[in-house]
Image: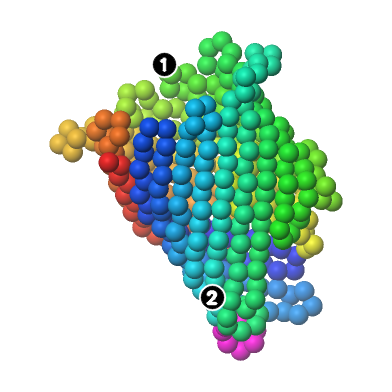
Amino acid sequence: MQLDGERGAGTYDGTLKAGHLGVDAKGDGWLAGLSVSRSAAELDYHFDGGVEGRGVLETTLTGVHPYALVGLGATELWLVGGLAGGEARLTREHTGGGWQRADLSMAMVAAGMKRPLTLDVAGAGIALKGDAGLLRLETDGGAAPLTGLAVDVSRLRVGLEAAWQARGALVPFAEIGGRLDGGDGETGAGLEVAGGVRIDNAVSGLGLEAKGRVLALHSAEERRERGVSVTASYAPGTAGRGVSFRVSPRWGHSADATDRLWSDARAARHSGAGGRHTDAYADWGMDAVLGYGFNVPSLRGLIVPFSRLDLAGDAGRRLRAGVRYARADGARRMARLELSAERAGGIHEGSRRHTRLLFSAQARF
C-alpha cells in the first residue's frame, strides 16, 4: 500500500506492506477462526513550518486476530479481536541522523449484529443493525519523541436497513443510523444516511450497483463526510469460466455505511492543519479488474489470468498482473493459489515507487 500526501506545512511519502495467514472452521450456523498478521511501514517525512526538518519513521507489527460469526435464528452476530506487538524506529536527519526506537503495541476489538424486524414499510424489509469498535495504539520504552505516545479511537453505531425487492433484479436499499465517535481526534454524535440501488441479472451475469453515504449531522464543528460509488461487473454463470470484469469508480469517503473503524484513511489527507475534515469530493479513485477463466482437466481446477488497476486520486496508483488457480470439491473443500507482480507508487514528483512479487494461498477443508 502506498502512503503519499500533504498535511499543513509537511509532506510524507512511504509504503505499508502486510501479510495474513489464517485458519477457520465452519459449522451449522457458525464460523470461527484465527489469523496471524505481519506488517511493516516506512514513512519519509518533511516539514518546514517555521522549523525545517526531515526524517524516516519505520514500524513493524506482528499480531493475532481471532474472529467469530454466529447465527442465532434470524439474528447474526460477529466479533473480531486483535493484539499486536512490534517496534517503532525514528531517524531524524535534521538532528544529525541519530535514531530512537520504542516498543509499539496495538489492541482492538469490534462486534456487530443484524436482525430482521417483523416490519413491512412500503413493501420493504426492515433490519436492525449495530456495531461497535475500539482501537488503541501506543509506544513504550525508548526515548523522546517516541516514548509514551498513545492513540485511542472508538465508534458506536445503531441503525435501520431497508431493502425493497422489486420486479426482476432491481433492489433498492437504504440505511439510517446514529453514530457516536470517541477517543482522540474529533468526537461527538452524528446521523448517517446511506442508500442506493442494485441490479443483478443471473442470466447474463451483468451487475450494477450505485450507492452513496452522507454524514447528515454531527456535533463536531465542520465535520463533513460523504461518498458515492458505482460498480459495474460481469461474471459468467459457468463456474467462473470465460471473461469477467469489474469497474468501480468512487468519490469522497467510503460509501459503505459499515466501513471499518480505521478504514477512513483517505479523510486524513484532506484534513486541515487543525485536523478538521474538509470537503471529501476532491478525493476520488477507481478499481478495475479483468480476468479470463478456463478449465485445465489435468489440474482438476480453474486457471484465471488477471490484471488489476487501482487509482487513488492524487495519492498514487497500483497495477497488478498475475494468474490464479482455484479448485473446489463440493461445498466445503476449496483450494486457491495466486501469483502476481505489482508496480505501485505515488504520482507526485519524487514519490516512492516499488515493484514486488506476491504469492497467496488459501484452503478450506
Amino acid type at mark 2: Asp
Give residue 103's mark.
2
Q: Residue at x 55, y 61 (%)?
A: 107
User: In which quadrant of the rendered view does residue 357 lie?
Assistant: bottom left
How far across and down, in percent of the image, does residue 243 sit? 37, 30
The answer to whether residue 321 of the structure is visible from this angle is no
SS type, badge 2: strand
Up/down of 357 relative to 258, above or below: below
- Residue 149's quadrant in the figure? bottom right
Disc 1 packing (10 Å; few <14; some 14–19; many ≥20): few
Residue under the point 80% across and 44% down = 218
Which mark, by number, is residue 283?
Answer: none
Relative to 156, 72 lies left or right: left
Residue 203, disc: 1
Quadrant in the picture for residue 229: top right
- Mark 2 and mark 1 lie on one chain; the one further toward the N terminus is 2
